[in-house]
Amino acid sequence: MFGIGFPEMVVITIVALIVVGPEKLPELARTAARTIGELKRSAESLKRTIAEESGAQEIIEEIRPELEAASKNLQGELHNLAQPPSPIAEETEQETAEEENTAAQIEASETEAKALQKTDNAADEQEREKNAQN
């Protein structure tokens, strides 16, 4: 630990005992031990962070070609969407619109026919009631 051997530790302990005194030496030792422990934990955390970031950088470098290819593909798709539609696409859109319009007209005709049928049925019913009263 920091290149300090047992003899150096004995000298440091004797100097600390003389300077601090026997009453405060245990408290000082606990504080020093906590500080050294926190420094060790911080150093390990820093090592892990550096290792994780270098690993993340390697992963980014591995997937970079795939990301660039996807980006080019997306740009091409957006470019195709920005171009005006081809005449074939316009004809298809017109045909679809005409089919929808025809379907709407058929539906409206069917609705009108049902309404006329109800009106005729109601008129027939009224006529039967008049005949029944006479």
Image: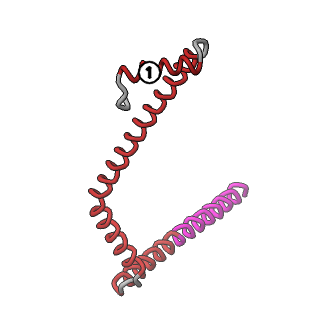
Is residue 27 found left or right of 87 in the rendered image? right
Is residue 18 found left or right of 45 in the rendered image? right
The colour scheme used to paint the residues is: secondary structure
Secondary structure of the magenta portion, mostly? helix
Q: How busy is the neighbourhood of tag 1: few (under 14 within 10 Å), some, or many (20 plus)?
A: few
Image spot of residue 92 (x, y percent): 37, 80
Q: Image height check: is 42 above or below 70?
A: above
Q: Residue at x 51, y 21 (%)?
A: 15
Asked if residue 110 lies in the magenta stretch, the reply is yes
**Residue at the bottom extreme?**
87
Q: Residue at x 54, y 71 (%)?
A: 108
**Residue at the right extreme?**
133
| Camera-nearest residue between 114 and 134 | 114
Q: Image height check: is 110 above or below 59?
A: below
| Camera-nearest residue between 130 and 21 | 21
Residue 3 position by quadrant: top left
Image spot of residue 13 (x, y percent): 47, 19
Quarter of the figure that contains the C terminus: bottom right
| Image label count | 1
Quarter of the figure that contains the N terminus: top left
**What amino acid type should be assigned to the residue bearing mark 1?**
Val
| Camera-nearest residue between 3 and 52 | 3
Asked if residue 24 lies in the magenta stretch, the reply is no
Look at the numbered disc 1 and give the secondary structure of its residue.
helix
Report the residue marked by disc 1.
11
Residue 90 position by quadrant: bottom left
Image spot of residue 85 (x, y percent): 39, 83
| Camera-nearest residue between 61 and 116 | 61
Q: Residue at x 31, y 66 (%)?
A: 68
Magenta region, residue range? 108-134
**Residue at the top extreme?**
23
